[in-house]
Image (cartoon, rainbow, N blue to C red):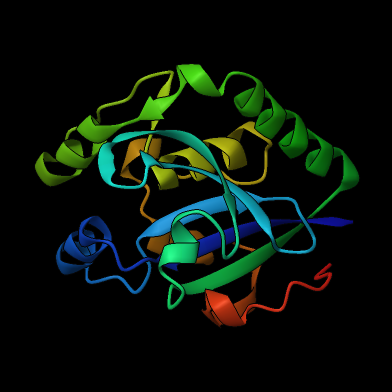
Amino acid sequence: MKEVYIMLTQVGTLVSKSIKLYTKAKYNHASIGVDPSLRVFYSFARRVRYFPVIGGFITEVVNEGIFKYYPQTECAIYAIKVSDAVYERVCEILEMYKRNSGKYHYNLMALLGILINRPFTHKYKCTCAEFVARVLHQADIYTFNKPFCFVRPDELPAIPGTSLVYEGRMVNLDNRKAG
């Protein structure tokens, strides 16, 4: 058995603070990873630090990139135990996104869709939680009973078999082997 990790964060950017005002959720960003050191995750988010509109598939490294500039970032990391075959499938899916990262963009329309209760989906566009939901579905780990673009980060910990590994400030995260 291996583990797949879901990281939820609340960064101190204006965009994340605005989303928090609307959702009232503790965490408003989701990432997924397979690194047992809990250091590398993948998501859909801004690609340019000062310009949140330009977004897409990104690699997130704990306490680096945007997290380096917001050391008080709150996070929660959850683990889902999976078979070796499912773990390999998640790795293959993530590799496909990494190889083709340039064609993936952030699904800004999905944010509007949430407000008006209309799904806006696109093969090459995702929100952060939509991406995590797609990977979980494609790897046969879990499927939500709604369009992926309606999945919110705060719903991910409710997935059956999910267990909390760490919660606190990212800067205090101990990067030793988790699984």
Q: Give the residue displayed 43% in from the left and 73% down from the top.
A: 73
Residue for point 41% across, 69% down = 70
**In the visual, does 116 lie left or right of 100?**
left
Q: Position of residue 117 (x, y in %)?
A: 15, 40
Q: Looking at the figure, which quarter contains the N terminus?
A: bottom right
- Front-lying residue, 85 or 92: 92
Q: Is residue 153 above or below residue 100?
A: below
Q: Position of residue 60 (x, y in %)?
A: 56, 50
Query: In the image, what residue occupies the spot 30% across and 70% down?
Result: 25
Residue 17 in the image, given as x and y percentages of width and height: 22, 66
Location of residue 121 with respect to 130 vertically, above or below: above
Looking at the image, which residue is at 60% across and 50% down? 32
Q: Nearer the viewer, residue 170 or 79?
A: 170
Query: Quadrant of the image for the C terminus?
Result: bottom right
Q: Is residue 148 above or below residue 123?
A: below
Asked whether residue 64 is in view, the answer is yes
- Residue 41 pos. (x, y %): 62, 51
